[in-house]
Image (spheres, grey):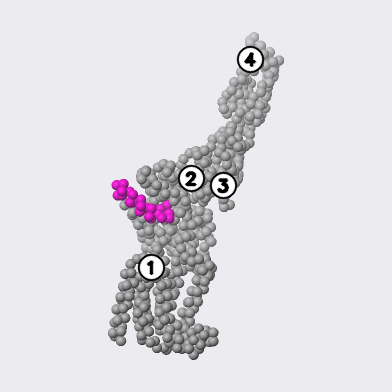
Amino acid sequence: MRRWLAALALLPWVLAQSLLVPPEAKAGTPLTLEGRDLPEGRYPLVVEGPTGPKTLEVVPEGGSFRLSFTPETPGEYRVRLSLPSGALEGRFVALGQAPTLTEEGLLLPSGLYPLPKGPWVGPLVQGERVYLAQGLLVLELGFNGEARFHFAPAKVVALRPGPEALLEGERVLSIPFPPRPFEGSAEDLKALRPLLEALNPPKPWPYFAYWALDPKDLSPEDLEAYRQDLLARGHRPELPFAFAPVLALAEAAKGLSGKEPEKARLLTETLLRTSPLFPGSLAFFQERAEALEAQGLPAQALRLREAVAVLKGWLPPSLEGLPEALWVLALTYLALLAYLVLFYLPPQLRDLRALGGFWGGFLRHPLLHLRHLSLAYASFGERLLALLLLVLLGASWLLYGLDQRARSLLFAPPLDRGTLRTQAAQDWLRSLPPTPETKALLGYALLPEAPKEAKTLLGESGLPFALALRGEEEALAEAYRKAPLEGPIRTTLGLGTDLWGAREAGPSARTLYSVLLRVEFGRFLEDPWRTFLALPLPLAERLKPWAFLGYALLLLYHLLAFLLPRRKGNVPPTYALAVRLLVPGSTGFAAGLGVFLLLLAAWGLLRLLQGEGPGPILLAYTLHLLGLGLSLRRS
C-alpha cells in the first residue's frame, strides 16, 4: 500500500519528464537532442538508425540536457533514453542531400561513389535512384551506393524522367533498355573501354560491349555470351556484317592460329555462328579449314568447308568475269566497226567524189552525206550484228555499274550491321521505291515492333521469306517450292535445320542484292543521265558525261543506218580479200556466225596483252583461214 502511495506521489513529476527530438533533419548536419525535467544521474541514450545503434551517455544538469548528434545517412532514426522511471522515446527522419557530381565522382548521402573522369550526363534523381550516363553506359545508383549498369544501343545524349534516355538520332528508350541492335560507332566503343576497365560491370554484357575489348582477351564464356546476345537482338547470319569489330575478330583468329590454336578455333566458330558474311569471309573460312586440317582436325575442317558451300548460296552471284567480258565485247565491236568501214570504203569514196569527197561532203552537202554513211553499204545482217554488239556492250557496262553500286550498298551503312531491324535500316527501307520486294523487306524489319503493319507489307510480295513469315499453309508450301534448301523454311516445315539452327525466315544477302539491283535499274530508267554519272564505273569523273554522250551518238548512228537504203557498190576483189584476211570471221558476218570467231580473237588478244599465251588468237586465225579457203574454193 505504501508503494502505491509513493508512486501516486511521484506521478506528476514523472509525467513532466520529456525528450525533445526534431521531426526532421538533414543527413550530415548536426541536430540537437534535448531532455527536460529529468532526475540527476547518468543515463544511456541509444540512437538507432540505418547503419545500426549508437549508444551515448547524458548527464542532466538542473534536470535537463542538450546533446548534439549528426546523422550520417538518410533514413528513419529512433532515440531511446533509459531512466529509472522508464524509457523516453523519440523519432526523426534524416533527409538525404541531393546527389552531386564532382571531379572525384558522385556524392551520395551514403558517401562518395568514385567515377572515372569524362563527359557524364546527369545526375537524374528518380526517388532513391540516381542515373548517370557517359557514351553507351548508363549507371544507376541507389542512395546506399548499390550500382546497376545499363548499356545503350547508341550514344546517350540526355537523361529524362521516367527514367528515359535520349540517344543519338533523336530516339528515346526507357531504362532498362530493350534488347535492340547496336547502332553506335567505333568511336563509341573506343570510349566504352576505359569505363569497363574502371567500373568493371558484372557480366554477361550486351554483345557490343565485348567489341570494346581486345578479341584476344575474350574467354570462352565471353564468346558464348556474345553469340547468344547478338542473335537474340535480331541479327541474322544470312545478312552482311562489315562492321570493324567483326573484322577485328577475324584478324585475331588469323593471328592466333599458330600461337593459340584453340582460341583461334573458338573465334572462328563464333564468326561462323554469328556473322559469316563479312568481307572476305569465304577465303577466311577456307584458310581456317586448311589450318584445322594441318592441326589434325579434318572433321572440323570439313564442317567449315560445308558451311562455305552454303554461304555461297547466300551471297550475291559472282560476276568476277564481267570486266574481262566487257573488254572482249569492246574489242569485238571496234573490230567489226573497223572492218565495215574499211571493207566498204572504196564504193563509199566513189559515191562521195561527186559531193566533194569524204571530208568535203560534210561541209558542202551534210544532209546528202548522211545517205553515204559506212553502214549504208553494209548488209542488213551486218548492220543488225553491229547494233546487237553495241547494245550488248552498253547493257554489260550498265550491269557492271549497277552490280558495283548494289554490292557497295550491301556492305555499307546501314546494311553492314547484320540486321535490318536498326532504326537506320528501317528509315533507309522507307526511302526506297515502294515495290513489293522493298515492302517485304520493310515488313520483315518491322515485324517485332508492328506485327500488323508488317503482315500487310509481307503479303504483297512473293519472296520466299515473305511467304514463310505469313504463316499460312499455302504460302508456306509455295515458299518451300521456291526455296527448298533454305534452313529457316525447312525448320518451319519440320524438315531439319542447317548449321545455324532454328530461326525465323528472313532475307539473305542475295535477296538484298537482287532488290537493290532492281531499285537501281528502276532509277536508271527514270533518270539515265544522273544515274549513269553516279555509277561506280572505272572511268574518271570528267570522262563519264562524254562516255554517255558518245554511246548515245553511236546508238543513234546505228539506228539511223536502218532507215537508209543499202547503196550498191562493188568492192575490188583483191582489196576485199586483204581486208577479210585481217579480220577473223569476216566471211560470216552477214549471217551472224562469224562473230564467234571475232569474239575468240578478241579474247585471245586480251590474254596476249595480259602476258598469257597466244593460243586462242592463233586458233581463231587458223579457223578463219580455213573458212576463208573453203569459201574461195566454193566460189
Mark 1 and mark 3 lie on one chain; the one further toward the N terminus is 3
Q: Residue at x 52, y 48 (%)?
A: 187
Mark closer to the observer (3, 4): 3
Q: Residue at x 52, y 62 (%)?
A: 432
Looking at the rendering, the stretch of residues picked out in magenta corresponds to: 275-298
Mark closer to the observer (1, 4): 1
Judge whether residue 42 is colored magenta.
no
Q: How many marks?
A: 4
Judge whether residue 276 is colored magenta.
yes
Report the magenta stretch's main SS: helix
Q: Which mark is residue 609?
A: 1
Mark closer to the observer (1, 3): 1
In contact (CB < 8 Å): disc 4 and disc 2: no
Mark 1 and mark 4 lie on one chain; the one further toward the N terminus is 4
Mark closer to the observer (2, 1): 1
Residue pointed to by mark 3: 156
